């Protein structure tokens, strides 16, 4: 089996029950698995709430015990959600601007040139983490050199090798953001911190806590997801060099290929919601104040929607994948992530002849009823110049 093959562990449960179950820190979660049902739940924000009273409870695994700052606009429901979203969305659409793309291209070129110079490297730490962190400086509009600190934090801001949720490690990020907010108050600039501090929502200036909520989401939400997307795509093209050659010959399918890679690898497995009233999901009863999760990874392999769902079809014509979520709370950073992938694949076709996987250690999520390969803890790859 190819190293870039990601099996679908949800198939049997999705077809037979539509639901899965997992215990998350003694707070059970019912996992919604079918594409149609996941979309329906994501759309129904009144019954399946993102806001809720307990900050961090909608994330799986729950972050209730490691943070008390609400991520904005992620953990806010309509109508307040729209006000926050309208404020920050133009900033997160900046990757569509030509100047942003030129700078991002320079960053991607730099990472790929480093890989080609080394010849062989560990992709997660030495390639994907560097690319994600350096690209984040553009999104925040701060000096490139700041990425060195973020790279030193490792691939996940809430997780360490021996624990799924590490409060001490999370505090490194929170303390950093607090300090950066204070710097922006003292010396405003053109960065995201300063923009937020100068902004109003519904006639009121954003508080430091609200600004911190946006920044936590920006740092944490786009970290391991982007790292997974980049790493897994490198693994795929190493396994299938003919696909990289195809992109060289058919650049017109580039955008379609990106959506397909994101569908197949689904960098984020699931996202939770809190149930606000007794209801049913997939003909199964769910109680008020219990939790469900919308399993994007399962929905993206639903054979009722995707023909040859367990294959990467680079020119897939119809691809309503849910890897960036769905409905009101769809991913704020999707434009940034897509641009990273677009420029990455473009530069790979220009500079890299082929790649070879030398060794790897898979990253397997333990979801009680399921075990899902979400990426790699490490993967050694040799890069060959074009």
Image (cartoon, rainbow, N blue to C red):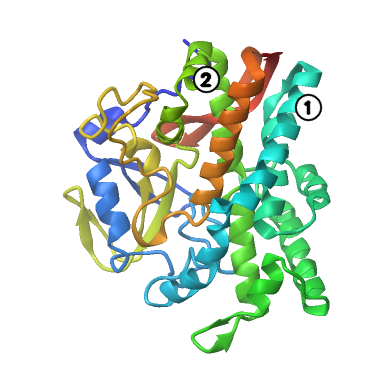
On screen, residue 66 versus residue 370, left or right, reads right
Of residue 16 and residue 204, the one placed in the foreground of this image is 204
Q: Residue at x 81, y 52 (%)?
A: 146
Q: Quadrant of residue 197?
A: bottom right
Of residue 339 and residue 182, the one placed in the foreground of this image is 339
Point out residue 199 in the picture as x, y percentages from the top left corner.
Answer: 61, 80
Q: Quadrant of residue 125?
A: top right
Between marks 1 and 2 in the image, the one whose residue lies nearer the viewer: 2
Of residue 31 and residue 27, the one placed in the foreground of this image is 31
Q: Is residue 340 above or below residue 46?
A: above
Q: Quadrant of residue 66?
A: bottom right
Label 1 belongs to which residue? Answer: 114
Q: Is residue 38 above or below residue 161?
A: below
Point out residue 144 in the picture as x, y percentages from the top left corner.
Answer: 79, 50
Label 2 belongs to which residue? Answer: 248
On screen, residue 213 versus residue 288, left or right, reads right
Q: Residue at x 78, y 67 (%)?
A: 180
Point out residue 112 in the picture as x, y percentages from the top left corner.
Answer: 71, 28
Regarding residue 162, the answer to whether it shows in the image is no
Q: Residue at x 55, y 43 (%)?
A: 339
Which of marks 2 and 1 precedes in the sequence? 1
Question: Gap between marks 1 and 2, in whole Å?
Answer: 21 Å
Regarding residue 126, the answer to whether it shows in the image is yes
Numbered tag placed on residue 382 in the rendering: none
Q: Residue at x 75, y 71 (%)?
A: 181
> Around disc 1, counting alpha carbons within 10 Å, would you say few (fewer than 14), some (14 to 19), or many (20 or more)?
some
> Around disc 2, counting alpha carbons within 10 Å, would you say few (fewer than 14), some (14 to 19), or many (20 or more)?
some
Q: Residue furthest left?
A: 283
Q: Is residue 91 above or below residue 15?
A: below
- Per the image, label 1 sits on a secondary structure element best described as helix
């Amino acid at each position: 089996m190819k190293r870039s093959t990601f099996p679908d562990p949800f198939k049997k449960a999705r077809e037979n029950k539509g639901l899965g179950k997992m215990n998350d820190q003694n707070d059970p979660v019912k996992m919604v698995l079918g594409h149609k049902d996941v979309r329906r739940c994501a759309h129904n924000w009144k019954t399946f709430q993102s806001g809720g009273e307990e900050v961090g409870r909608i994330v799986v695994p729950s972050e209730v015990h490691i943070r008390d700052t609400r991520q904005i606009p992620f953990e806010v429901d309509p109508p307040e959600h729209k006000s926050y979203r309208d404020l920050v969305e133009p900033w997160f659409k900046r990757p569509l601007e030509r100047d942003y793309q030129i700078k991002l291209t320079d960053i991607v070129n730099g990472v790929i040139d480093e890989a080609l110079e080394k010849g062989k490297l560990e992709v997660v730490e030495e390639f994907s983490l560097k690319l994600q962190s350096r690209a984040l400086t553009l999104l925040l509009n701060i000096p490139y050199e700041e990425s060195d600190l973020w790279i030193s934090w490792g691939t996940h801001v809430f997780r360490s090798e021996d624990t799924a949720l590490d409060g001490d490690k999370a505090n490194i990020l929170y303390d950093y953001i607090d300090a950066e907010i204070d710097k922006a108050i003292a010396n405003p600039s053109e960065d995201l911190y300063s923009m937020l501090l100068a902004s109003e929502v519904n006639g009121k200036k954003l508080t430091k806590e609200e600004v911190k909520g946006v920044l936590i989401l920006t740092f944490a939400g786009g970290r391991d997801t982007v790292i997974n997307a980049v790493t897994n795509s490198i693994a795929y093209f190493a396994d299938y060099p003919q696909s990289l050659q195809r992109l060289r010959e058919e650049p017109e399918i580039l955008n379609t290929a990106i959506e397909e890679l994101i569908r197949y690898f689904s960098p984020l497995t699931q996202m939770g919601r809190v149930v606000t009233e007794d209801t049913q999901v997939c003909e199964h009863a769910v109680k008020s104040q219990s939790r469900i999760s919308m399993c994007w990874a399962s929905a993206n392999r639903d054979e009722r929607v995707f023909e040859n769902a367990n294959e990467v079809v680079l020119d897939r014509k119809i691809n309503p994948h849910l890897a960036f979520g769905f409905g009101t709370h769809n991913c704020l950073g999707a434009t940034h992530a897509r641009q990273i992938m677009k420029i990455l694949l473009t530069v790979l076709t220009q500079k890299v002849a082929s790649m070879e996987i030398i060794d790897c250690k898979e990253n397997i999520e333990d979801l009680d009823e399921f075990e899902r390969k979400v990426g790699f803890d490490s993967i050694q790859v040799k890069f060959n110049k074009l």
